[in-house]
Amino acid sequence: MIKLRLTPYADDVTWKWDGTRYMTVDHSSEAAPFPHPMVEQMAVTDGQRTLLTVRERVAGCSTADSAPRNVTTGEYDRAKELAGQWPTDFVLVEMVRDEPVRVTAGPCRTTPLYLAHDDTGLYGSWDMADLREYAVGLNPREVARLLIYRPRYSTDTAFRGIHRLTERATAYYGGHLFLCYPEPALHSGPRELAPEADVLAAFVQAMDDAVDLRPLELETTAFHLTGGFDSGTLATRAAQRFPARISTSALLIGGPGRAQQIRRRKEMRTALSFAGQDLLIDAMEEAPLHPECARVRGDLISPYEEPLHRPFTRMTKALAEQGARTVVTGLCGDEMVALSQAEYPHKAMGEPKDVALLPWIGERARNALEFTDDGIAPPAVVNSMSLLSLETTAPVLLREGIWPVHPFADPGLIQLGEWLPIDWRELKQLQRRQLGALGLSDDVTHPAERESFAEVVQHSLTTHARPLFARMLKEGSVLFDDELVAPDGLRQAVRRLNAGTYRENGDAQLLQVLDLHLATQAFL
């Protein structure tokens, strides 16, 4: 939500607002908020210190005045304290005369903030492409995490020289960059329900609270309605509250679940009063790695952006063309009702022992797997996997002028999920029962077929990926040079793909190999 260039040890911390950005009077520092009706900015100074705040707007609060305001020392301290309590996404930038600069992120992250520095300044952006010149090579530990699908929320990125500012963390820069993690966020466990407890009523109220927290303009807001439980629950509830005003969109999947997805979406849209506008993009036709995909064209697309980049970008552009300025998603619904290992012992994603299924993992990456949990951020207010998921969608949306809203990442809904007994969370019983309470059929609440993008990924890897792998193996890759991907193992996997013996568990991860390879070509 912000792009910045900061020079520490300023003699003068006076800032001015020019209508699009803050800038010091000597032009040595600047901070540009993302221009959107859902974002606001403000600045206060006591003459020695200046605090810039860029934040997601909250309903019921008048829009902040962007012009810097002179305050007393006590008023400054109070303003800083209140800025850190804001209930939605925010970033704070503080400059103190003759001191290092400080940048702090809030707990409810909606957009990423990547940081880099040189000898004189700190640079930041929600779009990693802006920091390309500071990427000086690959980070083996982080690349190893990505290759085996074991994401970890930390200050690491795939590129040495570019860092992530995690939730509630503070970056200090005075010639050298120091990133300071916060204390772990405290969480609670399931509670026993009172005899009169109305779980669905509490769920509906929590959804309403999360949506109402932001000043949404429904005429320029689109809801994702994939047909799944999470987006379906949010969109149908919104349609209940605002009849004939909720427009929808979705990516159509492939495989046996496609007809079911179409059928379930139609039932939801028929049973509730939605707006007539329903945008559908066929992800099989606009598949990842399509020749017109931005990654394939060589655009500066980070490896953290949406894996289904081509179809998601196509849908986002189409929504923007229809006038959408905000999108409400169902992301993080899985994490809201997730079962703990104690409740349901299960294998974690991307266990190092799974490397046997991935013969292309290079020796250096294998060695780095021992350290995949080193340096990760402490427990967050919002689940760390949720935060990583939100980071994948934000850049694509922001480039089209669209602000993302993710109600299931709201702390109120997260706490409700933590408190619910297991029988309300397992197999997403909470969402199923809410949809069932609307009178929707078993086809919606208990679908027979799996609905996922697995077939889209398979289609991409067995068609569009073939020439890309051939070129990579012929021309080489930084991933080979750094021994992070083994060319012989990759060649073996590609032969199997070409032979028509695709394995979902073991071959789907090849998409990440190409995403990383294309990112290294663009950034390094």
Image (spheres, rainbow, N blue to C red):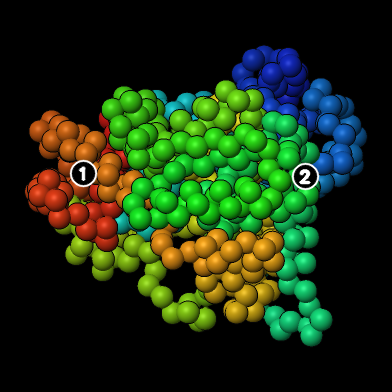
Q: Give residue 269's position: percent from left, percent from top.
A: 62, 47
Q: Which residue is mark 2?
A: 242
Residue 290 appears in the picture as rendered: yes
Q: Image quarter for residue 365?
A: bottom left
Of the 4 image quadrants, the one containing the N terminus is: top right
Disc 2, SS: loop
Residue 406 appears in the picture as rendered: no
Which amino acid type is shown beneath numbered disc 2? Answer: Phe
Of the 4 image quadrants, the one containing the C terminus is: top left
**Who is closer to the viewer here, 439 or 77?**
439
**Who is closer to the viewer here, 332 or 481?**
332
- Residue at 12% x, 46% y is 498
Q: Is residue 504 above or below residue 405?
A: below
In screen coordinates, is 276 left or right of 175?
right
Q: Residues within 10 Å of mark 1 (few under 14, many from 20)?
A: some
Q: Is residue 303 above or below residue 63?
A: below
Q: Residues within 10 Å of mark 2 (few under 14, many from 20)?
A: some
- Residue at 41% x, 75% y is 346
Q: Give residue 164's position: percent from left, percent from top.
A: 50, 43
Question: Are the residues at dot 2 and dot 1 in contact (C-beta closer than 8 Å)?
Answer: no
Mark 2–mark 1 distance (CA, rounded to whole Å): 43 Å
Which amino acid type is shown beneath numbered disc 1? Answer: Thr
Q: Give residue 31's position: percent from left, percent from top.
A: 64, 25
- Residue at 40% x, 55% y is 257
In screen coordinates, is 331 left or right of 37?
left
Q: Which residue is mark 1?
A: 462
**Who is closer to the viewer here, 364 or 60?**
60
